[in-house]
Every structure is written in structure tokens, then in C-alpha cells.
Image (spheres, helix red, strand yellow):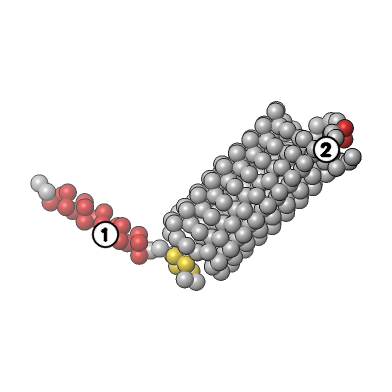
Amino acid sequence: MFRPLLTILGLSLGLAAHAAQDDVKINGCTLAPGANCAGMDLRNADLSNMDLRRINFNGADLSGADLRHANLDLASLEEANLSRANLTRASLQQARLRMANLYKARLVGINAWGMVAPAVRAEKADFRGANLQFARLSGGKLLRANFEAADLEMAWFNRADMTRTNMSDANLQEAKFGETNMQKAVMTGARRHYATFVGTYMEGCRDCPHGWEKNIYSKAN
């Protein structure tokens, strides 16, 4: 009666061993949950659909990499180069991207709940339909970034540069934009309930809150 159980156990162990042998290794970096790939050269690498939870990509070069549908929850990507990378539908919940380079990166539909990315550089990045609830992007460079229909509820953008940023149809409920530069940004159709704009600069901003220029903290004074 124990033979079927032993067979199942043996099969499970075999599958586990096979999975371990199938771990992808690029330039000395084993791409697996919790791995240390800090500073590695992974330019244009295909990392799509991979389980990369808690991985250390600090300072790594991931420019042009394919990270579509990858699981990067709790990953550390501080000062990593993700310029022109494709992270469509990736999961970055509570990932750390302090001072990361996301120039022209594609982040459509990402789940980045609680992502911590102060001083991130994301000029012309595509965040359409992204979930950025409770994310922290204070001090970020977000010029011409596209947040169309993104969920930015309770996200922090204090002192960020959001010049010409598109936030049309986005959810900005309770988001923080203290002393943020939103010159010529677009908020058409955005939900702004309880969002705060203390000292926010909005010259030429389309469908932004009125009366910003009267704020004593405004850059206009």
C-alpha cells in the first residue's frame, strides 16, 4: 500500500531536482528567488515569466531586458538600469527601486502595490493601467511619463518632476503631490478625490485643480 505513496514522493523529488537544474544562469547570475545578482550585466536578457521574488538586482544593467509577467515582488533594484526594458504585466509589489533608471521603460499593467522608488528616473516611461497604490515615487524624474488609467491611490509624488506627465483617467484618490512640478501635465478625466496639491506648480496643466497659483508655497511666488 506504500508503493503508490513512494512513487509519488519519488516523482515529486525528481521534479524538484529537474526544476533546480533548469534554473537559468546568465553571466554568473542564477536567476531564482532570493538570488544575488547585484551589478550583473543582463542587458537585453529574456527574463519573462520568471519567479524573481526577493532577488537582488541592485546596480544591475537590465536595459532592454524582457521582464514581461515576471514576479519581482520584494525584489531590490536600487540604482538598476531598466531603461527601455519591457515589464508589461510584471509584479513589483513592495519592490525597492531607489534611484533606478526607467527611461522609456514599458510598465503597462504592472502590479506595483507599495513599491518604494524615491528619486527614480522614469522619463517617458509607460505606466498605463498600472497599479501603483501606496507606491513611493517622491523626488522622481517623471517627465513625459504616461500614467493613463493607472491606479495611483495613496501614492506619493512629493517634489517629483512631472512636467508634461499624462494622468488622464487615472485614479489619484488621496495621492500626494506636495511641491511637485506638474507644468503642462494632463489630468483629463482623472479622479482627484482627497488628493493633495500643496505647493504644486501647475502652469499650463490641463484639467488640473484651480487656484494653485494662490498657494503661498507655489513656485510661482
Residue 1 visible from this viewpoint: yes
Q: Which residue is mark 2?
A: 217
Gap in Å between the C-alphas at discs 2 and 1? 64 Å
Classify residue 209 by image quadrant: top right
Q: Nearer the viewer, residue 54 or 191?
A: 54
* Marks 2 and 1 close (CB-CB < 8 Å): no
Left or right: residue 40 versus residue 136 is: left
Identity of the residue furthest to the bottom in this view: 27
Whichever of labels 2 and 1 marks the residue nearer the N terminus, that label is 1
| Residue at 53% across, 45% down | 93
Tag 1's secondary structure? Answer: helix
Name the residue: 73% across, 47% down: 160
Task: Specify whether 36 is left or right of 202.
Answer: left
The residue closer to the viewer here, 159 or 61, is: 159
Q: Quadrant of residue 187?
A: top right
**Residue 102: horizontal and vertical position, in percent?**
66, 56
Q: Secondary structure at mark 2?
A: loop
Q: Position of residue 37 (x, y in %)?
A: 50, 64
| Residue 125 in view, yes or no | no
Residue type for callout 1: Gly
Which numbered dot is residue 14? 1
